[in-house]
Image (cartoon, rainbow, N blue to C red):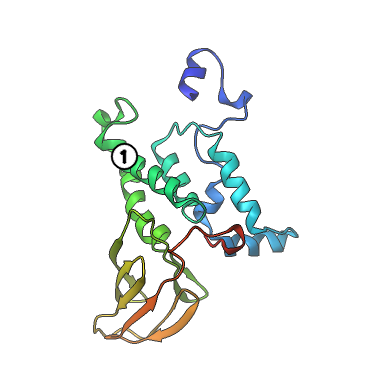
């Protein structure tokens, strides 16, 4: 849409239309908890339903003129509309495989989009983040993604993570690293090298309501 308007001497800036993610980058870069803390410092509230409303507003008005746009929108949709999130994620995967931008792949693959899809599995669907000297995991796999496995290194400690729709399994291989603090689904625990921790997951069964929203 942005290219069509430009060819006709027009611009998306004259309309309630966006070429790619802009405001929604806030929800890509920060978790809902982090944003609420920032808003509170500025004297504002950030109720969960406002996040859902903002995401829907911009999704309906974005032309995805960038290969990174679908990736970002898929990320911010993951906790509110997993079916749409998965659809946008698979479209991002196809960017270079199917040359969806119409000729850009001949100039070279988009490594940012490729890395972003891998990062999305780990930090978005896997719910991995660091806050307050703790490694947090809040996994929410889409129905189409029945399992995911990846390996992290946190404070010198390798951690193998295996996720399914029903459970999260963390294995810390033996090494000389100090104990690390982890939090999975709100349960906090100190793990040592060689430990294995399994946590049942309850959040993957159904779409969350706005009041349950975590990003």
Residue 90 located left or right of residue 2:
left
Q: Which residue is mark 1?
A: 110
How far from the left and from the top, in percent, is residue 161?
31, 71
Hey, which quadrant is residue 9 in on the image? top right
Q: Residue furthest right?
A: 43
Residue 157 seen in render:
no
Residue 194 located left or right of residue 64:
left
Name the residue located 35 percent from the left edge and 57 percent from the top edge.
Answer: 121
Assess disc 1: are there few (<14), some (14-19) or many (≥20) residues with their C-alpha within 10 Å of its C-alpha. Answer: some
**Position of 190 relative to 93 (above/below):** below
**Position of 5 relative to 80 (above/below):** above
How far from the left and from the top, in percent, is residue 81?
49, 50
**Position of 186 relative to 42 (above/below):** below
Q: Residue furthest front?
A: 206
Q: Residue furthest top?
A: 8
Name the residue nearer the viewer: 179 or 72.
72
How far from the left and from the top, in percent, is residue 166?
36, 70
Residue 97 seen in render:
yes
Hey, which quadrant is residue 11 in on the image? top right
Name the residue located 57 percent from the left edge and 64 percent from the top edge.
Answer: 212
Name the residue located 39 percent from the left edge and 56 percent from the top edge.
Answer: 142
Name the residue located 56 percent from the left edge and 17 percent from the top edge.
Answer: 10
How far from the left and from the top, in percent, is residue 44?
73, 58
Residue 156 located left or right of residue 202:
left
Q: Secondary structure at mark 1?
A: loop
């Amino acid at each position: 849409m942005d290219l069509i308007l430009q060819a006709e001497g027009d611009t998306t800036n004259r309309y309630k239309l966006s070429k790619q993610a802009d405001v929604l980058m806030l929800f890509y870069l920060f978790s809902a908890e982090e944003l609420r803390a920032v808003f509170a410092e500025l004297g504002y509230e950030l109720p969960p339903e406002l996040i859902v409303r903002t995401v829907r507003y911009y999704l309906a008005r974005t032309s995805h003129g960038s290969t990174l746009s679908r990736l970002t929108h898929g990320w911010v949709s993951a906790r509110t509309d997993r079916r749409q999130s998965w659809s946008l994620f698979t479209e991002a995967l196809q960017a270079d495989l199917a040359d969806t931008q119409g000729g850009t792949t001949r100039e070279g693959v988009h490594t940012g989009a490729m890395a972003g899809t891998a990062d999305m599995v780990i930090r978005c669907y896997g719910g991995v983040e660091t806050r307050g000297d703790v490694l947090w995991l809040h996994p929410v796999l889409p129905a189409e993604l029945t399992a995911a496995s990846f390996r992290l290194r946190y404070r010198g400690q390798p951690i193998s993570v295996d996720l399914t729709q029903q459970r999260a399994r963390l294995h810390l291989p033996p090494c000389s690293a100090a104990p690390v603090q982890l939090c999975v689904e709100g349960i906090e625990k100190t793990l040592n090298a060689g430990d294995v921790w399994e946590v049942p997951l309850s959040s993957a069964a159904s779409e969350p309501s706005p009041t349950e929203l975590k990003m």
